[in-house]
Image (spheres, rainbow, N blue to C red):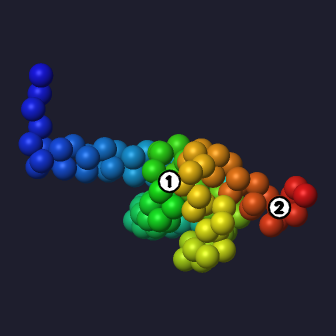
Amino acid sequence: MLIFKKKQESAFSKDEELNFIFNCINFIKEDLEEINPFENDFEIQSFISEIILFGEHYKIRNELNIQKLIYFNLKFRFVLNDKTKYSSILNDVTINEDVRVVNFHKFLLKQEGIID
């Protein structure tokens, strides 16, 4: 059995975060190429960090849900710093994180007039 010290846990956690960011960079460059507005990896990484902070504000931490927020932002260009606009949809932590992300997607689709 491995015994992690706090420093090791922190390093492991940082490695996981860097791996996730690397995967997201590839996700944007490969899967979202047609809506990718970024010039380089540094811009993409900065954007991903903003999305992670946005998700953290609403206690959205699941990696797949963060990737969904990345897609939603690139597709619908929602404003990351307008926290009051989305608070009624994303703030209710009594609702499962996955459901809140689905509800947010529906909100964005309605806002675009794609669904009623």
Specify the farthest residue to the top.
1
Label 2 vs 1, first from the N-terminus: 1
Residue at numbered disc 2: 110
Q: Residue furthest right?
A: 116
> In the picture provided, is 106 more to the left or to the right than 63?
right
Q: Amino acid at mark 2?
A: Lys
Amino acid, disc 1:
Ile
**In what element is the residue under mark 1?**
loop
Instruction: From the viewer's perspective, tell me whether residue 22 is left or right of residue 95.
Output: left
Find residue 110 and report its image quarter. bottom right
**For the residue labelled by badge 2, is the local secondary structure a helix, a strand or a loop?**
helix
Q: Can you identify the residue that label 1 sits on?
A: 60
Where is residue 47 shown, x and y percent of the image?
48, 66
Tell me: residue 6, above or below residue 77: above
Q: Residue at x 12, y 37 (%)?
A: 4
Name the foreground residue: 66 vs 5: 5
Taking the image as drawn, is residue 30 in sight? no
- Residue 96 in which image quadrant: top right
Q: Residue at x 43, y 45 (%)?
A: 23
Determine the residue positioned at 57% across, 62% down: 91
| Residue nearest the observer in this picture, 94 or 51 | 94
Q: What residue is rendered at 82% in x and 65% in y?
A: 112
